[in-house]
Structure formats: structure tokens, C-alpha cells
Amino acid sequence: MLIVGLTGSIGMGKSTLATHLRARGIGVFDADAEVHRLYAGPATRLIEVAFPGTTVGGTVDRGKLSDALARDPSGFGRLEAITHPLVRQAERDFLHREYAKGSKLVVLEIPLLLETGAEEMVDAVILASASEEIRRARVLQRPGMTPSKLALILARQGSETSKRAKADFVVDTGTSLPESIASLDAILDTLGERQGSAFTRHWA
């Protein structure tokens, strides 16, 4: 089973690529979606202890948590110490299910894959990338997003130059959607010829 890491900074279009992968019948694990699930209950108690007043009715209030992190960015480390082990276990469970099904290729969609060194745990990395101007325009259209919040997010994400150097493949998502999808499909054709070893080395 070949494990592919799909990554990209905020606003770079990786979720659009992931949607296409699912449409092709490829199993995709969404790390962000898993964090949202954890915020809805499983990690609430731990997060309330670490960030008092950020949970309401048994779930994490993302706005309050975001405000707490804006006041004290060092809190990102405490938050990651809570969520990362839980997400990693969910990734492992997903990969074992896919392996048992006989899947030949699966995808881990992880925003900070390259920043955390997780590229060592996959067989290949696909990076969604676009220009800074396009990224900012996309992200600042999101409800509740401000230039200061965006700056806080970007401070935790690696430079695009560094990411491009580390990635095995880059999909330019600053072009038209059909062009981006065609680029992704061409990469999948190339990957279809590869054998993976990451599952045995890191996940079995």
C-alpha cells in the first residue's frame, strides 16, 4: 500500500484536491476534520484544563480557543501535545482499515505535514501551492478571518520555497481548476507504478 501525504498552507487548495481524490475512490484521511471531531467531545476535557474557559456545553468553542492562542501563541505547543497523539492514532486506525481492504493507494491530508517532519511517515508528498497573492485573497474572504489572524496562522507554517523543495510533487492550484485536476491526475498515474514501504516501516 502506497501512502501519500497531501499538504499545503492555508488557502492553497489542498481540500479541493482531496475532494477530487475521494471522487476517484481513493481513501483520504482529513487531519483537520479529525481535530474538529476531537473538539466536539473527545478532547474537550483536556483542552479545558489547558485553556480554561474555551469550552462550552462539552465542546471546544473555536473562537474562544483562537482568541486564547492569539493572546499567548506559546499555547500552540500545549494544544498540539493534546491533539497530535489523538490524530496520529486515528491516522493509524484509518491506514489499518485501508490495508485490510486491500487498498493500493491512500492519502493522509495533513496541513503541517512538512513542518512536523511527518514526510518521513509517507511514501510520497504532494504539495498544493499557489502564489501569495492568490492565497491571501482566498483566505481573507473566509468568515471571521482578519489579516492579524492570518499572520498568526502563517507564522506556524513553513515558507513556500522550503515546502516546494521538500515535496515530491507540486500541484499549482493558482491555475484553473481543470488544469490543477489534470496535474493531480498525472501525478496519480505516476504513483500508480510505485510500491510503498511506509506502512510497514511506521504504521504496521
Image (spheres, helix red, strand yellow):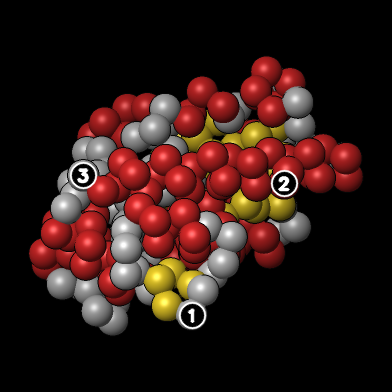
Mark 2 or mark 3, whichever is nearer to me? 3
- Tag 1's secondary structure? loop
Q: Mark 1, residues whose alpha carbon is within 10 Å: few (<14), some, or many (≥20)?
A: few
Kind of residue sitting beneath label 3: Ser
Q: Which mark is residue 57?
A: 1
Q: CA distance from mark 2 to mark 3?
A: 31 Å
User: Can residue 155 be spotted in the picture?
Assistant: yes
Which badge, 3 or 1, is on the more N-terminal residue?
A: 1
Q: Quadrant of the N terminus?
A: top right
Considering only vertical position in the picture, is 180 above or below 96? below
In percent of the image, x 65 and y 47: which residue is there?
Answer: 90
User: Can residue 171 be spotted in the picture?
Assistant: no
Q: Position of residue 4 (x, y in %)?
A: 59, 37
- Tag 3's secondary structure? loop
Residue that label 2 marks: 94
Residue that label 3 marks: 74
Q: CA distance from mark 3 to mark 1?
A: 26 Å
Q: CA distance from mark 1 to mark 2?
A: 29 Å
In percent of the image, x 62 and y 52: which residue is there?
Answer: 29
- Farthest residue in the right direction? 101
